[in-house]
Amino acid sequence: MQPRAISAAKSLLFFLAILFAAVTQAASPAIKAPQPDTPKRVLFVGNSYFYYNGSLHFHARRIALAADPAWAKPFIYKSATIAAAPLAHHNIEHLITPGNLGVKDPFDMVILQSHSTDAMSEKNSAAFREKAIEFNEKITARGAMTALYMPPAHIKPSKWAASPDMMRRTEALYVSVGNEIGALVIPVGLAFEEAYRRRPDIKLHQDYDGNHPTMLGTYLGACVVYASLYGKSPVGNTYDFHGLVDKDDAAFVQQVADDTVKKFFGR
């Protein structure tokens, strides 16, 4: 068999495995907590899901600072984003090289977020897996750990809202690849799903596309990142982006984030 045919066969088998997991139940994440226990230098690599609403990395760090100012003061969070980008659009070697982003020491954690529809096709699922493997090798060679930011499923009016299995496929893809490469999987998509289950009227996606996060959606994502990275509950956190996040809504999504992360990791 020719190398190209072998590669295509492997991609097809991987996609079929993802489909099987999606229609049954996604495997549990193998990695329950990051190493080191307290990532201080964190790089977010993704697209508009990260940079909307003032950037998710900004809010995640502010949540940590509000929880414990002395503990979180040394934290350095950086974000590198390209609109609508899959992982292949990023020059990961440049991004993680000390000094290139104004951080002289190597990153402790690199959080990867790819296109939100990757799980919906064989080609894109295989491309995500290939790049995640490649990026993880480079990230771990620098002494850092890889994390995968699981995005939420779309809602109306997105055309993908007609695919009721979008979240299951996305969950299966991220958990499968995360387990394969030994990455921490951050279950943001599952937190969105749980928030909608508890409060169907909540606004976590933009009305105009059913895709990008509202400010509250970004806040929920930041809470899940904080809980996943540090094993700490965001419940009761006082950070509200200078009053732009309603206190009752903040309390609700903090609880959802805490419950989702604990359930996902079996903590």
Image (tube, rainbow, N blue to C red):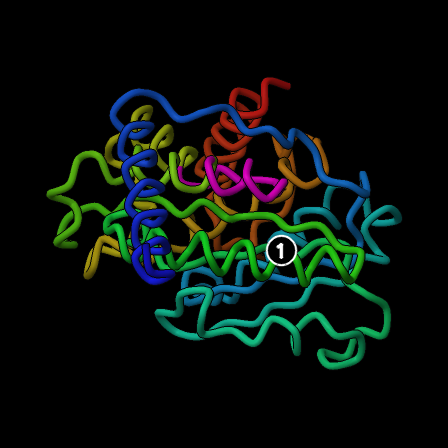
Which residue is rendered at x = 42% and y = 48% of the image? 216
Q: Position of residue 164 (x, y in %)?
A: 17, 35
Asked whether residue 203 is drawn in magenta, I would say no
| Magenta region | 176-189
Asked whether residue 183 is drawn in magenta, I would say yes
Furthest-right residue in view? 70
Looking at the rendered image, the quarter that the C terminus falls into is top right
Q: Position of residue 77 (x, y in %)?
A: 70, 62
The residue identified by callout 1 is 136
126 horizontally vs 33: left or right = left
Which residue is rendered at x = 72% and y = 39% of the image? 34
Q: Secondary structure at mark 1?
A: helix
Looking at the rendered image, the quarter that the N terminus falls into is bottom left
State whether residue 182 is above or below residue 83: above
**Res. 97 image quadrant:** bottom right
19 horizontally vs 177: left or right = left
Question: Hey, what amino acid is under mark 1?
Answer: Asn
Q: Position of residue 234 (x, y in %)?
A: 63, 34
Q: Position of residue 19 (x, y in %)?
A: 27, 34
Q: Between 165 and 205, which is closer to the camera in this rendering?
A: 165
Which residue is rendered at x = 86% and y = 46% of the image? 71
Which residue is rendered at x = 80% and y = 38% of the image? 37
State whether residue 242 is above or below residue 97: above
